[in-house]
Image (cartoon, grey):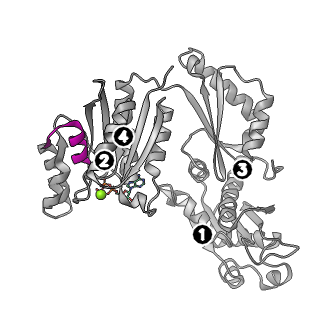
């Protein structure tokens, strides 16, 4: 099957000056690939109307679909709508509905509608308007005749990534699926932590999975996302979903099911732990040294975190460990801050002082300086206190400073998850 071809056009001078990374195109390319399209070109261009027109015309020669991002704002450098109209040889016309929405939006903010905003109510005549519910710039689809007289949809999306992803998921993806008669092939995703991609790959290679299942690995440091999908030829097979389930069970048994923390492609470790803490009605507190609050940052990223997260003490110095966590000066003197005893005392201290059900502590040498022969850079102790029990594990994390902090935070989240679920708290590094 020849796949439908797509050109992406990212518009904005900030993308060319290196101030902003073009994450919009990466997002769209991923989504479109998952829908079965093939992205044949990604163009990044300046906010110059004539360049946009040229780029759109070039795309119309060899693409079944064109998407533009950016340049839909109210200022005079935002001229994507003008460029699309010119490429389509259409007039721009004002949408009264869009004017009404913009007016209502301005009123809610207690301001009169700015004259420049009227620009955002202009669309190429006949274009389908896709309402943007998270911003003011509506998206639109303009059908433009290519040289061989095929109607090619040109989709124009707002630049702010949050708006783009929202409008794409809500409005564009369903329309593309209808228009191009796409049936989304079944997939099964899961995420694991604590195993390398190569280890999981070598385990999978020893298994005899159902023939029509393909396995794709995508590292999201420090997590690993694995997607099982059906070969396109088998995508419509009535047993497809069963094949995926079978393959999943075999892989889970092969790598150890406790390494898999979710079957939701978009759920990170912190989200998975949040769901677990909420389900069990447990409240967590943390004591952080080398991660400097990164663990707390991860824990409060999900809405409603106050249901399960009580506090994090960022006790970077020895004196902070003494004052806020009750770690004894004599202990710190005797064994040092990066030690089993200190990790345990930190977890114990924060649990009792805050009144949490479970607590986790992190203390380590993030580097690049400060290592010793006994405690080289990358040494981390993580402590867990739950009920009457307090334990600590030692790790060596051979990463650069910030990657090490990220990994240590993930380890702490994973140990709490394992503790609650009764999984082993130690494992061989693979
Ligand atoms: P606005 O109404 O905010 O002006 P717009 O549709 O005109 O929206 P731009 O002005 O091009 O969009 O960009 C708005 C914001 O989105 C900027 O902060 C820009 O850095 C960001 N942005 C634009 N294009 C991209 C892209 N391709 N990848 C990532 N961020 C982008
Ligand atoms: Mg703009």
Disc 3 marks which residue?
418
* Residue nearest the viewer, comparing 360 with 189: 189
Is 139 placed above or below 242 here? below
Circle 2 is placed at which residue position? 52
Q: Which residues are magenta?
A: 80-93
Q: Nearer the viewer, residue 286 or 22?
A: 22
Residue at image coords 51%, 58% = 301
Q: Earlier in the sequence, mark 2 or mark 4?
A: 2
68 magenta-colored: no
Q: Main secondary structure of the magenta part?
A: helix
Q: Could you tell me which secondary element the residue under label 1 belongs to?
A: loop
Whole-percent x, y for residue 417 in the image: 68, 51
Q: What is the C-alpha distance between the residues marked 3 and 1?
A: 21 Å
Q: Nearer the viewer, mark 3 or mark 1?
A: 1
- Residue under pointer 4: 67
Count neighbours of disc 4 (C-alpha within 10 A) and say few if under 14, some if 14 to 19, many if 20 or more: many
């Amino acid at each position: 099957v020849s796949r439908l071809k797509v050109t992406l056009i990212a518009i904005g001078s900030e993308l060319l000056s290196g101030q902003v990374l073009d994450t919009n195109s990466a997002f769209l390319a991923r989504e479109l690939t998952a829908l079965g399209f093939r992205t044949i070109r990604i163009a990044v261009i300046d906010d110059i109307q004539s360049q946009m027109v040229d780029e759109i015309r070039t795309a119309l020669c060899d693409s079944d679909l064109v998407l533009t991002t950016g340049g839909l704002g109210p200022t005079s450098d935002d001229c994507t709508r003008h460029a699309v109209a010119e490429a389509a040889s259409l007039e721009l016309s004002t949408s009264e509905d869009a004017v009404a929405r913009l007016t209502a939006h301005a009123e809610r903010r207690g301001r009169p509608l700015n004259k420049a905003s009227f620009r955002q109510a202009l669309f190429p005549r006949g274009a389908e308007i896709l309402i943007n519910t998270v911003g003011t710039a509506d998206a639109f689809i303009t059908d433009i005749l290519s040289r061989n007289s095929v109607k090619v949809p040109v989709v124009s999306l707002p630049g702010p990534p949050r708006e783009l992803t929202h409008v794409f998921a809500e409005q564009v993806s369903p329309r593309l699926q209808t228009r191009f008669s796409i049936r989304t092939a079944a997939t099964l995703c899961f995420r694991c932590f604590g195993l390398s991609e190569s280890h999981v790959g070598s385990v999978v290679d020893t298994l005899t999975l159902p023939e029509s299942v393909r396995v794709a690995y995508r590292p999201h440091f420090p997590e690993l996302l694995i997607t099982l999908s059906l070969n396109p030829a088998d995508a419509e097979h009535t047993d497809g979903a069963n094949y995926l389930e079978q393959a999943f069970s075999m892989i889970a048994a092969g790598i150890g099911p406790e390494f898999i923390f979710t079957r939701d492609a978009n759920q990170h470790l912190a989200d998975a732990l949040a769901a677990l803490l909420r389900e069990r009605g447990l409240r967590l507190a943390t004591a952080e040294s080398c991660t400097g609050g990164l663990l707390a940052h991860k824990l409060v990223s999900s809405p409603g975190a106050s249901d399960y997260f009580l506090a994090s003490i960022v006790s970077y110095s020895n004196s902070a460990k003494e004052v806020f966590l009750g770690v004894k000066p004599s202990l710190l003197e005797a064994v040092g801050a990066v030690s089993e005893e200190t990790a345990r005392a930190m977890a114990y201290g924060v649990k009792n002082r805050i009144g949490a059900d479970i607590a986790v502590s992190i203390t380590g040498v993030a580097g690049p300086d400060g290592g010793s022969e006994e405690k080289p850079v990358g040494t981390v102790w993580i402590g867990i206190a739950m009920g009457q029990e307090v334990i600590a594990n030692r790790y060596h994390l051979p990463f650069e400073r910030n990657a090490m902090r990220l990994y240590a935070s993930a380890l702490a989240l994973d140990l709490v998850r394992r503790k609650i679920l009764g999984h082993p708290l130690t494992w061989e590094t693979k």
